[in-house]
Structures are given as C-alpha cells and as structure tokens.
Amino acid sequence: MNADLDKRDFFKDPFSESELKKIIKMSGKKPSELLRKRDKMYKELDLGNVKKTDVQIIKLMVKFPGLILRPIIILDNKMYVGKIDASKIK
C-alpha cells in the first residue's frame, strides 16, 4: 500500500485541547484508554490510582504529551492508536 504521509512530532508541535478531543472522539475510546502507562509522568501523577475526569486527563495530555499513547495513525477517517497489527488496517 502506498500512501502520502503527514508526520507530526507532537513533542515539538503539541496538540491543542480541541485537537486531542477530536482524536479521542475518532478513536471511540475514553481519554484514560489513550494514556501511555509507561511514561514517567503517569507514575509521578499516580494516574493508575488517582481518578481524573476526562477533561482533567485531556488537560494533562496537552501539558505532558509523553502521556499520549503512540503512534496515532489516521487513515480514511479511521483512527488507530498504539501498537497496531498492520493487517487490520484497511
């Protein structure tokens, strides 16, 4: 499959809250499901034990982009996040 790619380093060009909300909505998942549990901020903020609202989680993701599960691939209005089995991308 050949495709034109637009890459974005969201550490250098961070997502806005509205962009993250759109990405989260496209994923069909809750913000907490898109958190990278291995990130040091996840541990420092004790996100495994401290309950946060979706809005609070999105604000943390904007402030600390390392918390965002990656890669994020958007293809034909479908979104894939995290480790992806390439055979499932259609």
Image (cartoon, helix red, strand yellow):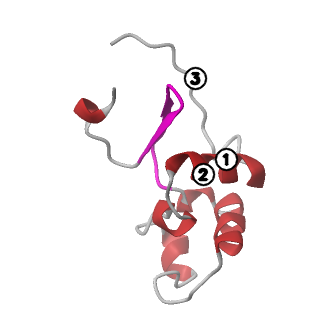
Whole-percent x and y of residue 5? 52, 19
- Report helix, strand or loop for mark 3: loop
> Label 3 belongs to which residue?
6
- Report helix, strand or loop for mark 2: helix
Q: CA distance from mark 1 to mark 2?
A: 5 Å
Q: Contact, CB < 8 Å: mark 1 with mark 3?
A: no
- Three-letter amino acid code of the residue under disc 2: Lys
> Label 1 belongs to which residue?
22
> Label 2 belongs to which residue?
25
Q: Contact, CB < 8 Å: mark 1 with mark 2?
A: yes
Residue 29 relative to residue 58: left or right:
left
> Residue at horizontal 39%, vertical 49%?
82
Res 59 visible: yes
> Residue at horizontal 51%, vertical 53%?
28
Identify the magenta region. 69-81
Relative vertical location of residue 42 with respect to residue 50 in this rendering, above or below: above
Q: Is residue 32 within the magenta segment?
A: no
Whole-percent x and y of residue 39? 47, 66
Q: CA distance from mark 2 to mark 3?
A: 20 Å
- Report helix, strand or loop for mark 1: helix
